Amino acid sequence: MSKETVHDRTKVTPSAPELAVKSSHIPRRPKITPPKPRKDISTPTIALGEIPNLQILNEKGEISDPSHEPKLEPAELLRIYRAMVLTRKLDTRMLTMQRQGEMGTFAPGMGQEATQIGQIYPLTKKDWFAPSYRSFGAQLWRGWTIEGLMLLWDGFSEGFEIPDGVNDLPFSIVIGSHVATATGVAMGIKRRDDDAVVLTNFGDGAFSQGIVAESFNFAAVDKAPIVFVCENNGYAISMPVQRQTGADYLAGRSVGYGIPSMRVDGNDVLAMIVATTDAVERARKGEGPTLLEAVTYRMSLHTTADDPRVYRNEEEVEYWKTRCPLARFEIYLKNKNLLDDAAIERTAAECEQEVIEGRERFRGRATANPREVFDYMYEKLPPELEDQKREYLAKLDRKEERH
């Protein structure tokens, strides 16, 4: 893979849209290294850093270089595979429920299963995760329940309750705002002299938000123990990434902040695990933040209020289906004699049943009580809301009397 000089200052590795990577041009252990400092600002040819690309498992399910393959036990590989299948099954079931009026608006993540599970895999119980709103699989891996996530997206405040023993933050719908909160948590961890790490993910659209840039700067100056994962799925709702930036990649933005970065095939779960593991290790050793740009694709809707047929064509979707993260990982596991067609069908059926059982638990709890509308905003209601509450409850009483 060739290198080119941009403005004679920054050396980067150009990449194709599908992140084609030749293994001979990747270090045998793809460590993430910080940019080299400039000793003489008047020297125009000092490189600020290089942006490596990483792909281990290609779209055909083949290992491009065995030296990159993580040494995971068969049981772990199958656990990762099952988590990816469960993620997709939950996504598909919730979409059906939403279309039937049983679920609120939510953001499907079909096609991003490898990105979700791979980024979260290296975290321990003591580490923190600040998710975006398209992180069902990662949240399940961290200990959230299926019924809890369904409650959340059906509008019940109980769904936002963090499970016991899980160091996660609730996500925010405000694009990019949670990145600042995650950075603040990481800065606090450093001051406690703790060795925990924070990981936060966000989409390519969030990269256009000023608060993300501010978070980068604070994290870099403070050497905060945080990993930033940009899930570049091609679109910020209907806005393609090509119209969001004049650059060919987003990972290069971190160079100006002094943050090392890597561009990863987000549909390759092994590459995501390796890249995130290295980034987490850097943070835990006190070496500061890292940015990972996970190149993936949103095969479904931005949210259930969206119709992607308006702004993208089916040829593009079909192209990315051939790069499906689940399909390529299945081929890989088959080649290792860890999976066959019967096991694939059995895993799919088990995950489907797990989602159905979660749905039934959700249905047992999803009983709306209109009398609680005023109960959870203030500890003591202001006088004007007390008046509104009395009027509202009186109307409910009259309605109940009529029925």
Image: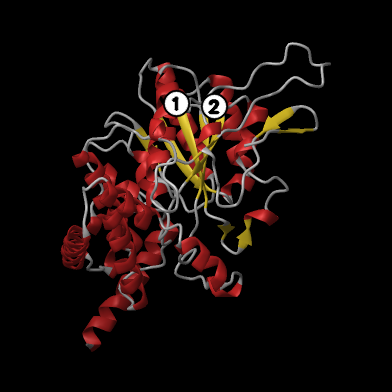
Q: Is residue 49 above or below residue 88?
A: above
Numbered badge on residue 219 = 2
**Quarter holding the N terminus?**
top right
Q: Are marks 2 and 1 in contact (CB under 8 Å)?
A: no
Lower position in the chain sequence, tag 2 or tag 1: 1
Q: Nearer the viewer, mark 2 or mark 1?
A: 1
Query: Residue 270 appears at what percent x and percent y?
Result: 38, 41
- Using a 10 Å C-alpha cutoff, classify the residue at mark 1 as few (fewer than 14 neighbours), some (14 to 19) or many (20 or more): few
**Quarter holding the C terminus?**
bottom left
Query: Residue 192 appears at what percent x and percent y?
Result: 38, 17
Q: Is residue 110 above or below residue 37?
A: below
Q: Residue at x 35, y 24 (%)?
A: 196
SS under mark 1: loop
Numbered badge on residue 29 = 1
Q: Is residue 63 left or right of residue 245?
A: left
Q: Quadrant of residue 272?
A: top left
Q: Relative to the observer, which residue lies in front, 293 or 320?
A: 320
